[in-house]
Image (cartoon, helix red, strand yellow):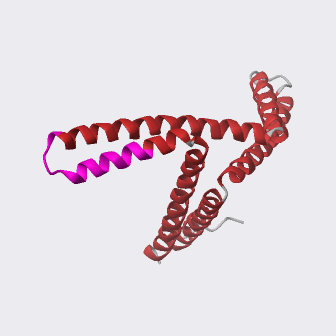
Amino acid sequence: MAKKAMSVKQLADAAGWAIGIAGFIIFLYGILLFVSPARTVMDTVFFLGFLLFISGLLKLAEGKLYSKGKEGSGFFVVLGLLAVVIGLIMLLQPGAVAAGVLMTFGFVAILLSILAFAAGIGQIMFAMKRKKNTIPLLIGLFFVLLGLVMLFNPVGTTLALVSLLGLFAVVYGVLMMLLALYVRKMLS
């Protein structure tokens, strides 16, 4: 029997559902990042480790299937072994990998603190050259203070950056769910 082709309405409906579900998942992930940034990063590392481990096993099986007389099977085996090893590291040491991720965010936090401090000093210098210009002076003082707080509290700043990423994911997820409604409505 020949399959009946999907109509434009059915296609739009399916696309709308897919976009909506993806948006909802991103929204939930954003909430988790915002509420519990360190734990969510560690859980994400564990989940990605599981996915890498399984996909590595599948690549090894694919390499075994292709090894009978076909070239290029070594690529699948090497890729599979690499994915299995990385997946195992992430599964067995999710805290250490998550700590590495958070340390990277910590390095970014330190760079941003230096930038905020320098911007504040520049803003204060600008305000000092102008008479009766208290707004640039206040902005400069705020940035100097922000830079110092960020520099002397890199862990808090790191978690704040991850939470900010979570807030972005929440907003993006909501926008995707609205897009899903628009796509479904547009062609119905």
The magenta-colored residue range is: 129-146
Q: Main secondary structure of the magenta part?
A: helix
Q: Residue at x 57, y 56 (%)?
A: 166
Magenta stretch holds residue 131: yes
Magenta stretch holds residue 116: no
Q: Residue at x 54, y 69 (%)?
A: 16
Vertical relation: 172 (above or below) 16: above
Vertical relation: 156 (above or below) 175: above
Total label count? 0
Q: Is residue 92 toward the left or the right of residue 188 in the image?
A: right
Q: Residue at x 13, y 47 (%)?
A: 131
Q: Residue 186 lies in what quarter of the image?
A: bottom left
Q: Residue at x 60, y 49 (%)?
A: 159
Q: Residue 22 lies in what quarter of the image?
A: bottom right
Q: Residue 140 lies in what quarter of the image?
A: top left
Q: Looking at the image, which is closer to me, 129 or 23?
A: 129
Question: The N terminus is located in which quarter?
Answer: bottom right
Where residue 112 appears, as percent x and y from the top left, is 45, 39
Vertical relation: 3 (above or below) 33: below
Where residue 33 appears, as percent x and y from the top left, is 63, 56
Q: Looking at the image, which is closer to me, 99 or 51?
A: 99
Q: Is residue 152 toward the left or the right of residue 75 in the image?
A: left
Q: Residue furthest left?
A: 131
Q: Looking at the image, which is closer to me, 169 or 160?
A: 160
Where residue 14 appears, as percent x and y from the top left, is 59, 68
